[in-house]
């Protein structure tokens, strides 16, 4: 199993290096972020589903390599097909062992207890069921909102959620905090028409993350490569401005 994982990690690193060479203008930028890809905490931290996550990274790298490897963006139909055949398998590999009880549509025992703690005095007949029914939508929306903003919070990726660490969650940073500057500069220098596939990929991951709590899901590993590409754009922007 360890040999398979090592092989997959080497293969994913090779694919990312080929992508970086095609994507960035400077070879040194491609080399630098290929090294970051190898040693970033998201890549090196051990997890229960490391093989699945690594295969997901391979699919993600292949998607962007095909999209940007030809010099110009594929047409809309090809992009959709690539998205279906590479994004969907990546998503499935990330979440296929996700426990159904942790979906936001399923009320857990803590939420049910919270609802039933206060009986509905206006409906003394079966007050509990009435309150469960009326509050179900509220709890679902709350869960979706919490999941979405946890996924969207850059603090989750660069600072291990400090100082907002969550109870019962082993917080780990995904990227070294020093890379945040590159990410912010790269994000604000994005050209939507040129980098539309990156924006769409990230948007889909964020939306899907609303369905799966960050406490249990590894879906956000699909953000690793597009985030690194954005950081690389930030470094390229800095190099362009200071002429190096």
Image (cartoon, rainbow, N blue to C red):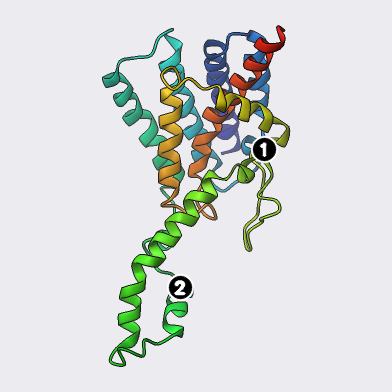
Give the left or right position of residue 141, taking residue 5 as reference: left
In the picture, measured across the screen, residue 239 lies left or right of residue 116, that is right
Residue 188 in picture, x, y percent from top left:
56, 26
Q: Residue 10 carries which label?
A: none
Is the Cβ of the residue at disc 2 closer than 8 Å to that at disc 1?
Answer: no
The earlier-in-sequence mark between 2 and 1 is 1
Q: What is the crowding at mark 1: few (fewer than 14 residues within 10 Å), some, or many (at least 20)?
A: some
Residue sitting nearer the eye, 243 or 171? 243
Which x, y percent locates residue 53?
51, 38
Label 2 sits on residue: 111
Q: Residue at x 32, y 74 (%)?
A: 134
Residue at 51% from the left image edge and 50% from the top image edge = 149
Q: In this view, does 11 lie above or below 133?
A: above
- Residue that numbered label 1 is attached to: 41
Number of marks in the rendered image: 2
Quarter location, residue 36: top right
Foreground residue among 239 and 56: 239
Query: Residue 166: percent from the left, percent from the top?
Result: 63, 59
Residue at image point 51% right, 41% down: 220
Quadrant the C terminus occupies: top right
Residue reaching furthest to the bottom: 124
Q: Can residue 9 be seen in this view?
A: yes
- Residue that appears at 42% across and 63% down: 101
SS at mark 1 in the image: helix
* Distance from Cα at disc 2 to Cα at disc 1: 34 Å
Give coordinates of residue 60: x percent, y percent.
Answer: 46, 28
Number of the front mark, 2 or 1: 2
């Amino acid at each position: 199993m360890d040999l398979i994982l090592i092989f997959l990690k080497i293969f994913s690193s090779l694919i990312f290096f080929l992508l970086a060479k095609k994507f960035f203008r400077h070879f040194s930028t491609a080399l630098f972020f290929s090294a970051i890809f190898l040693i970033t905490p998201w890549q090196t931290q051990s997890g229960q589903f490391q093989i699945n996550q690594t295969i997901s990274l391979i699919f993600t790298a292949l998607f962007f390599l095909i999209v940007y490897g030809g010099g110009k963006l594929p047409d809309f139909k090809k992009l959709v097909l690539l998205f279906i055949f590479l994004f969907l398998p990546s998503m499935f590999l990330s979440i296929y062992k996700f426990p159904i009880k942790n979906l936001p549509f399923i009320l857990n025992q803590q939420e049910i207890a919270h609802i039933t703690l206060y009986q509905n005095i206006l409906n003394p007949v079966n007050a509990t069921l009435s309150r469960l029914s009326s509050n179900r939508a509220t709890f679902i929306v709350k869960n979706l909102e919490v999941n979405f903003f946890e996924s969207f919070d850059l603090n989750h990726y660069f600072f291990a959620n400090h100082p907002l660490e969550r109870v019962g969650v082993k917080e780990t940073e995904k990227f070294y905090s020093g890379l945040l500057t590159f990410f912010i500069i790269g994000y604000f220098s994005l050209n939507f028409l040129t980098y539309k596939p990156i924006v769409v990929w990230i948007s889909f991951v964020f939306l899907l993350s609303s369905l799966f709590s960050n406490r249990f899901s590894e879906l956000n590993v699909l953000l690793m490569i597009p985030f690194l590409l954005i950081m690389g754009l930030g470094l390229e922007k800095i190099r362009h401005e200071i002429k190096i």
